[in-house]
Image (cartoon, rainbow, N blue to C red):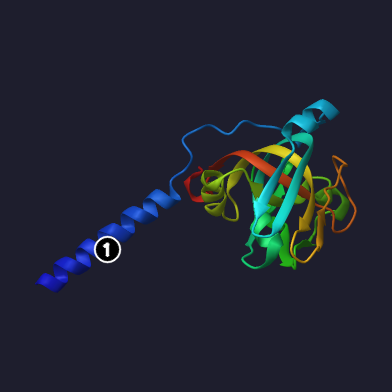
């Protein structure tokens, strides 16, 4: 009898944790039909840039543009090893505009190879998809943002806000250098292009809760 009660309590705890994990952000998602971005002035960049200390690494994070996007999650991959993973622990493949509404996004098949998002366009026009999709290297502002980003899944609706950044780093022990650049083109059709996004806010609605 005691074992049965223990199992029931354990099940209820797991169920409660899962429901909390799967709960939508209570805020509404603002809609943009494409990425909303504008370049920052030199003064704004100088005010926003800062150094992040990671062990022996000193990483200078340099914002270059304000960025907001409303999109569907096509794919997500997490990373756990190396300086790249510490700075940007997740990549997010997203599609916006006509792919945000309805189920057209499901026709876009994707897979990750290292930190590059590859597409299988099925019957869709490749240039059209590339002009409405992107692979974003996520750099969370803090642990609260990171927790939210970890909850994202394929098919979720998501709103991201933050800054497109470039990264410059130095290891004070080994003297190694580190750099990471972002595409500065709003609709970049080149292979392998991506954005480094310093995420200051995220709103998500899980796909299974949408009507």
Quarter-wise, where is residue 86 in the image?
A: bottom right
Residue located beneath label 1 in the image: 11
Q: Position of residue 192 (x, y in %)?
A: 85, 58
Q: Position of residue 70 (x, y in %)?
A: 67, 38
Residue 97 seen: no
Residue placed at 81% from the left, 63% from the top? Answer: 176
Extreme-left residue of the structure = 1
- Determine whether, in the image, residue 119 is placed left or right of residue 25: right
Residue placed at 47% from the left, 46% from the top? Answer: 209
Residue 6 seen: yes
Judged from the image, the secondary structure of the residue bearing numbered disc 1 is: helix
Residue placed at 48% from the left, 39% from the top? Answer: 25
Looking at this view, is 167 or 104 the one in front? 167
Counting every numbered tag in the picture gives 1
Quarter-wise, where is residue 32 in the image?
A: top right
Looking at this view, is 37 or 102 the one in front? 37
Looking at this view, is 149 or 172 the one in front? 172
Question: The N terminus is located in which quarter?
Answer: bottom left
Extreme-right residue of the structure = 190
Q: Position of residue 34 (x, y in %)?
A: 76, 36
Residue placed at 28% from the left, 58% from the top? Answer: 13
- Determine whether, in the image, residue 91 is placed left or right of residue 12: right
């Amino acid at each position: 009898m005691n074992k049965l009660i223990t199992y029931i309590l354990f099940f209820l705890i797991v169920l409660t944790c899962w429901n909390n994990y799967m709960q939508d952000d209570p805020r509404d998602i603002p809609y943009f039909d494409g990425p909303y971005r504008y370049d920052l002035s030199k003064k704004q960049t100088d005010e926003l840039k800062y150094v992040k200390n990671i062990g022996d690494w000193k990483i200078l994070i340099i914002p270059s543009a304000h960025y907001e996007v409303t999109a569907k999650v096509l794919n997500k991959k997490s990373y756990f090893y190396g300086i790249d993973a510490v700075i940007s622990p997740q990549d997010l493949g997203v599609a916006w505009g006509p792919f945000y509404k309805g189920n057209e996004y499901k026709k876009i098949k994707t897979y990750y190879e290292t930190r590059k998002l590859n597409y299988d366009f099925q019957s869709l026009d490749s240039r059209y998809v590339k002009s409405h999709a992107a692979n974003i290297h996520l750099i969370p502002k803090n642990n609260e943002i990171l927790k939210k980003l970890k909850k994202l899944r394929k098919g979720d609706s998501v709103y991201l806000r933050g800054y497109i950044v470039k990264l410059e780093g130095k290891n004070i022990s080994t003297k190694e250098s580190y750099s990471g650049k972002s595409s500065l083109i709003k609709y970049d059709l080149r292979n392998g292009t991506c954005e480094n996004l310093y995420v200051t806010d995220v709103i998500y609605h899980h796909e299974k809760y949408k009507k």
